[in-house]
Image: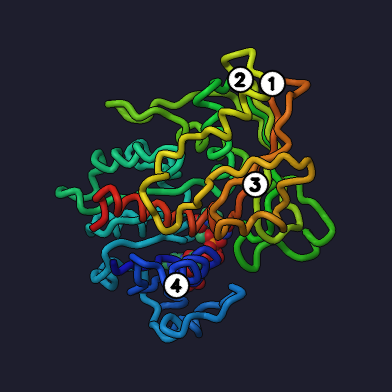
């Protein structure tokens, strides 16, 4: 399939280009960015920061403006657009009959738009049928969650299904790459921790709740557990970690029972043979010093969710840490997996 990338010059756009090299189903056929970049060769428009060579066939492609007319020949687009422009541009592509698979936050809470993690809520793609961008249903939008809501939702899913969630306290330790490029000033982050990431804490409750929500005839029915979130930026490169304490609904639940629920997680896409799906989606570490971003974020091509430190909590019921690669599982790789699921389910053809 021929695909386009909106926001191709940015940090997420570059990750798409890197990850889509040699993809068995998807071929990059168009690149879109702002008027600053449009008309230039990609190699001149983008400040390539990936640690592999810029693929030669992409280097010489001319960057388009993010206008559906300029990208009519693609089957669908991935979006890594800045949120200041994503509402307008993604909406224009959907209205032009070009499906959009987006990383931006703009449409995540639209009740007709799936917020999708294939192993957590694959059935939510049915929401696409309720979208009204085009009369014939050819244009639609699917989003993936914020980069820290991805590991949280994957870790919470087996626990929520088995025991329910009453309340949650989360402290995140988020890698520098999550801020894009050039990102956080070096003098702020070297040898330091910044105890606030603008806009991040407010996304955790609504995004994990929508992901864990149940699809009904009238939309997604969401749980409404309260969340106390503190999001911090730490000087790691890749891999967002979260320390989580959960109050369960169905009690008592022994740690062994929680462990069994996590290890016995029934991955709903396990049999679909999707190229970007990790073989083992949740890796539960027993070693108390694991998981660590530097050691584990790249496992299974950056698509695996790592959990560890699972234990009884002094406050609430259980505590654990979870971690996943933020720009792969939490952004471009997650969007590619979403597209693969949509192909397999017949929404993209
Ligand atoms: P970024 O590096 O700042 O890139 C932004 C992209 O948007 C660039 O390609 C830029 O093109 C383009 N753009 C800006 N203004 C535009 C306009 N008026 N018209 C068309 N294109 C325009 O940002 P990023 O870190 O890649 O993040 C991209 C999106 O993904 C954001 O919505 C972000 O919240 C989300 N996200 C990021 C991460 C992450 O880990 N970084 C994770 C999950 C989600 P020019 O180069 O031409 O300006």
Q: Mark 3 points at which residue?
A: 323
Asked whether residue 199 is in view, the answer is no
Please tell me in which quadrant of the rendered image residue 218 appears: top left
Q: Do the residues labelled 2 and 3 touch (CB within 8 Å)?
A: no
Residue at position x 26%, y 55% from top? 348
Q: Are there few (<14), some (14-19), or many (20+) residues within 10 Å of tag 2? A: many
Q: Which residue is the extreme one toward the right?
A: 191
Q: Nearer the viewer, residue 95 or 342?
A: 342
- Distance CA(mark 2)–CA(mark 1): 6 Å
Percent position (x, y) of residue 94? 28, 55
Look at mark 2 in the image and give the residue it sits on: 248
Q: How far is the residue under mark 4 from the one under mark 1?
A: 44 Å
Q: Is residue 81 left or right of residue 88?
A: right
Q: In this view, does 291 lie to the left or right of 86?
A: right
The quadrant in which the C terminus is found is: bottom left
Q: Name the residue under label 4.
A: 21
Residue 195 screen position, x and y as percent: 75, 45
Which SS class for mark 4? loop
Q: How far apart are the two marked residues, 2 and 4, measured between alpha carbons?
A: 43 Å
Residues at circles 4 and 1 in contact by the CB criterion of under 8 Å: no
Q: Which of marks 2 and 1 is nearer the N terminus?
A: 2
Residue 321 percent across, percent down from the top left: 69, 39
Whether tag 2 and tag 1 are in contact, CB under 8 A, the answer is yes
Check contact, mark 2 vs mark 4: CB within 8 A: no
CA gap, disc 2 and disc 3: 21 Å
Q: Distance between the residues labelled 1 and 3?
A: 20 Å
Whether residue 59 is visible, yes or no, is yes
Q: Is mark 4 within 8 Å of ligand 1?
A: no
Q: Which residue is drawn at 68% across and 50% down?
A: 174
Q: How crowded is mark 3: few (under 14 residues within 10 Å), some or many (20 or more)?
A: many
Labels 4 and 3 touching (C-beta < 8 A): no
């Amino acid at each position: 399939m021929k695909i386009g990338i909106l926001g191709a010059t940015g940090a997420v756009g570059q990750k798409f280009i890197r990850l889509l090299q040699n993809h068995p189903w998807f071929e990059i056929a168009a690149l879109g960015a702002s008027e600053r970049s449009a008309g230039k060769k990609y190699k001149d428009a983008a400040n390539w920061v990936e640690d592999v060579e810029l693929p030669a066939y992409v280097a010489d492609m001319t960057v388009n403006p993010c206008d559906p007319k300029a990208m009519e020949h693609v089957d669908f687009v991935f979006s890594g657009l800045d949120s200041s422009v994503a509402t307008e541009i993604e909406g224009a592509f959907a209205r032009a009959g070009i499906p959009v698979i987006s990383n931006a936050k703009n449409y995540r809470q639209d009740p007709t738009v799936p917020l999708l993690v294939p192993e957590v809520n694959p059935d939510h793609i049915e929401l696409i049928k309720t979208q009204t961008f085009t009369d014939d249903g050819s244009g639609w939008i699917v989003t993936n969650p914020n980069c820290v809501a991805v590991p949280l939702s994957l870790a919470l899913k087996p626990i929520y299904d088995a025991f329910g969630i009453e309340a949650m306290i989360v402290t995140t330790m988020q890698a520098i790459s999550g801020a894009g490029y050039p990102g956080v000033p070096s003098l702020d982050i070297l040898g330091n921790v910044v105890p606030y990431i603008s806009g991040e804490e407010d996304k955790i409750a609504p995004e994990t709740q929508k992901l864990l929500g149940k699809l009904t005839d009238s939309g997604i029915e969401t749980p409404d557990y309260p969340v106390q979130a503190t999001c911090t930026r730490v000087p790691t490169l890749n891999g967002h970690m979260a320390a989580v304490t959960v109050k369960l609904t169905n009690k008592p639940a022994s740690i062994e029972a929680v462990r069994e629920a996590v290890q016995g997680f029934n991955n709903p896409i396990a049999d679909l043979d999707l190229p970007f799906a990790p073989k083992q989606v949740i890796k539960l570490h027993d070693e108390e010093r694991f998981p660590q971003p530097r050691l584990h974020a790249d496992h299974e091509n950056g698509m695996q969710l790592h959990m560890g430190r699972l234990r009884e909590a002094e406050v609430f019921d259980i505590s654990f840490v979870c971690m996943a690669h933020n720009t792969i599982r939490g952004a471009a790789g997650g969007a590619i997996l979403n597209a693969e699921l949509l192909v397999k389910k017949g929404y993209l053809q």
